[in-house]
Image (cartoon, rainbow, N blue to C red):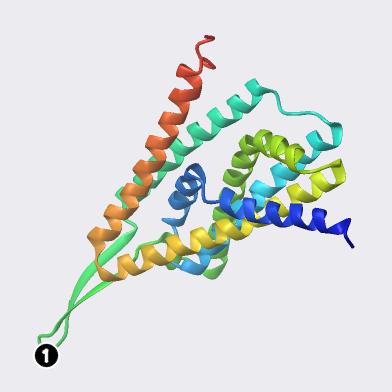
Amino acid sequence: MSSLFPVATVLAVGLGTGIRHAMESDHLAAVATLVVRRASWTEAARLGAFWGLGHTLTLALVGGSMLALGQVVPERAADGLELLVGVMLVLLGLDCLRRLRAGLLHEHVHRHGDGEVHVHRHFHLSQQRKSPAHRHLHLDREWLRATVVGMVHGLAGSAALVLLAVGVTSTPLVGLGYVAVFGAGSIVGMALLALAIGLGLKLTAGWAAWPYRMLAVGMALFSCVLGAWTVWRIGFAGGLLIGA
């Protein structure tokens, strides 16, 4: 019993660390740009969970392999993966701005026969006008997109996770368990974060169009700025792209 207590403690720490890891700024920026596409907060939560799934898949594959082999991810390779995340954040932000320009939120005024005026606001998403089959296909693509984004983040985070797992675990088996619960924590944490963002956007859109658009544009710009800063920090200041 006593020998299992340290292992249980390590795994509990891994779960909590995974939940906290999901809240990091680059993860927040990426998922926010994905959630802006969603009219339903439940679909937003699912997107966050799929991001966490992709994140966990690559963490388990790369991090688990490194732990099993007793190796670490080379520093230059880790920098290159983080640079890839920066480029992805810029692209996600720009795509979000493009979609916002096309108009995700539609507002129209309806006048009743008694003269009373009502303003109706709703998300102007293409899948609302399509058949259920087309809508499910669109959602499948969105979930796949979230999974791929999570996988890229998982690749970039695998180097730090291996070092962390080595530092807090005593055997490769416990280290693999740490990676597994860390990944589970990231799924839970990102689903909760995406749910909060989705609820905030939904409530804001129900109040007025302009606050929603300002919030959505802010999320997109945050992703672009953070991604550009990451590219500059690693690619130019760090010398990865200029051979310094």
Residue at image point 49% right, 51% down: 31
Q: Which residue is mark 1?
A: 114
> Is residue 134 at least partly visible in the picture?
no
Mark 1: secondary structure: loop
96 left or right of 146 in image? left
* Three-letter code for the amino acid on which mark 1 is drawn: Asp
| Image quadrant in which you'd find residue 111 | bottom left
Q: Nearer the viewer, residue 113 or 7?
A: 7
Quick one: which residue is furthest to the front in this view? 2
Residue at image point 27% right, 53% down: 214
Quadrant containing the N terminus is bottom right
- Structural crowding at the residue carrying mark 1, measured as other residues with C-alpha within 10 Å and reported as few (<14), some (14–19) or many (≥20): few
Tell me residue 19's x, y (percent).
Answer: 60, 55
Tell me residue 35's x, y (percent).
Answer: 46, 56
Q: Nearer the viewer, residue 36 or 218?
A: 218
Q: Nearer the viewer, residue 57 or 132?
A: 57
**Above or below — where is 84 with respect to 10?**
above
**Above or below — where is 93 with respect to 144?**
above
Q: Nearer the viewer, residue 39 or 66?
A: 66
Tell me residue 161's x, y (percent).
Answer: 68, 39
> Is residue 8 at least partly visible in the picture?
yes
Tell me residue 239's x, y (percent).
Answer: 51, 14
